[in-house]
Image (cartoon, rainbow, N blue to C red):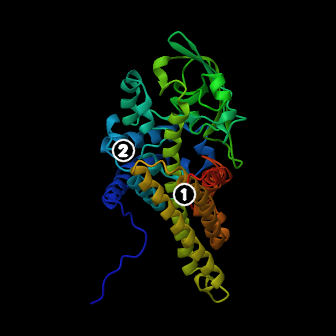
Amino acid sequence: MAVAIDHGIEPAAPGAKEVCDALFAFIDREVAKIQQPIEAALHNPRLYWREDGRLADEVVQARRAARMASAEAGFYTMFCPTELGGAGLSAELYFEVFEALCHRYGSPQTQLAFQVLAHASTGPTALWTYASDALKADLVPKLMRGEVQGSFAMSEPDAGSDAWMMTTTAVRDGDHWVLNGTKQWASWAPTADFLITFAITDRALFAARKGGLTGFYVPTDVPGYDLYSIVKVFDEIGGEEAILTFNDVRIPDEYRLGEVGEGFRVAMEGSGLLKMTKLARLIGLGRWANDKAADYAKVRKTFGKTLSEHQSIQNMLADNCIDIYTARLASLDVARKHDAGDQARFESAMSHALVAEAMYRVYDRSMQILGGIGLSNEAAMIHGWHLTRVSRISEGPPEVQRRTIAKYLLSGAYKF
């Protein structure tokens, strides 16, 4: 008797398939209703961006509506800690669900589907366990309902991957802090209701690279805060990255995140979650692009046969599968270690270098197989390609990850 074999990649974590099925049904039923009125804007840059480079108001409002609908349905906060009111589902489950979402819906810019799960930088995540009781009481309920959106503002003009080059300061003044400085590459800042930012609070400790950095919650309507400019990339007419300035911005001590001088610990909580999002997103998008390339190769004919019959195309598709398979296994290993309480910094650095480069190769090969169609707006490949290229720089480029890998290996901390 023949045994049925289920080929392909399916979410394997306990409950993942059930969560995906319910989530996708919700998106196709409810989020689609929110997206339909703004469909034209999602595919037309002249409608997607305002004249000043910010997202169009209708897009911002639709994103909020999608978040709030997801929160009401119980999906938005599935992976938030239980102490904040979320379901506290695992990192492995998060990876598989978000990867499956990206695989199903493709380009983030043209789909509101990517608003239905709380993001590490913009929504309610474990980072908010560091907030004061007063701040939690005021802000967390709004976050959990999807009403507000934040931005993670850490990088500076001269302090990107090397955070020790930071210059923004926060000086204690009674029960307040006074912030001064500049942040750059603050994602989602142009539409943010608040910032999660970091400043030097002890110059001596910071100069000695022994701490001295503190995290803060900063509402974007406080006096002295200015969104100085929007950073536009790839010749776009708008952007979601920004340069921010703090000029004697006063915030109460209850807006501090974590203990004074322990900002790096808070930042690592935020960036760790962000990196897990990055892994899932890139692999899901890589699978989406590879599917499009494989489907096209089966029907497009050149020189008397389909593309799929040409060995050069077969090799490209095979290389895509190898990259996706190895990247996915590495990412799942990191997620499982995270669930076991292991920060897995060595493995995390390796997975991020691997995934960023591998999924860029997958996307590039897929566009090559599609030929001229892959460059067209109709193929909707360009936004994913932008994202894979940006991801080789954002959240720690492969060059920095390799530095971390070598550091751990040479120190004897890990045997390999």
To which residue does mark 2 refer?
Answer: 70
Q: Residue at x 43, y 43 (%)?
A: 118
Residue 158 locus on image (x, y percent)? 73, 35
Residue type indicated by callout 1: Leu
Residue 234 locus on image (x, y percent)? 70, 50
In this orientation, which residue lies closer to the viewer: 229 or 204?
A: 204
To which residue does mark 1 refer?
Answer: 282
Q: Pointer 1 and pointer 2: residues touching (CB < 8 Å)?
A: no
Residue 398 locus on image (x, y percent)? 65, 54
First of labels 1, 2 by sequence position: 2
Q: Residues within 10 Å of mark 2 (few under 14, many from 20)?
A: many
Label tally: 2
In this orientation, which residue lies closer to the viewer: 328 or 38?
A: 328
What kind of element bears circle 1? helix
Residue type indicated by callout 2: Ser
* 64 shown above or below 331: above
User: CA gap, disc 1 to disc 2?
Assistant: 23 Å
* 345 shown above or below 332: above
Residue 191 as seen in the image, left or right of residue 164: left
Q: Residue at x 58, y 75 (%)?
A: 317
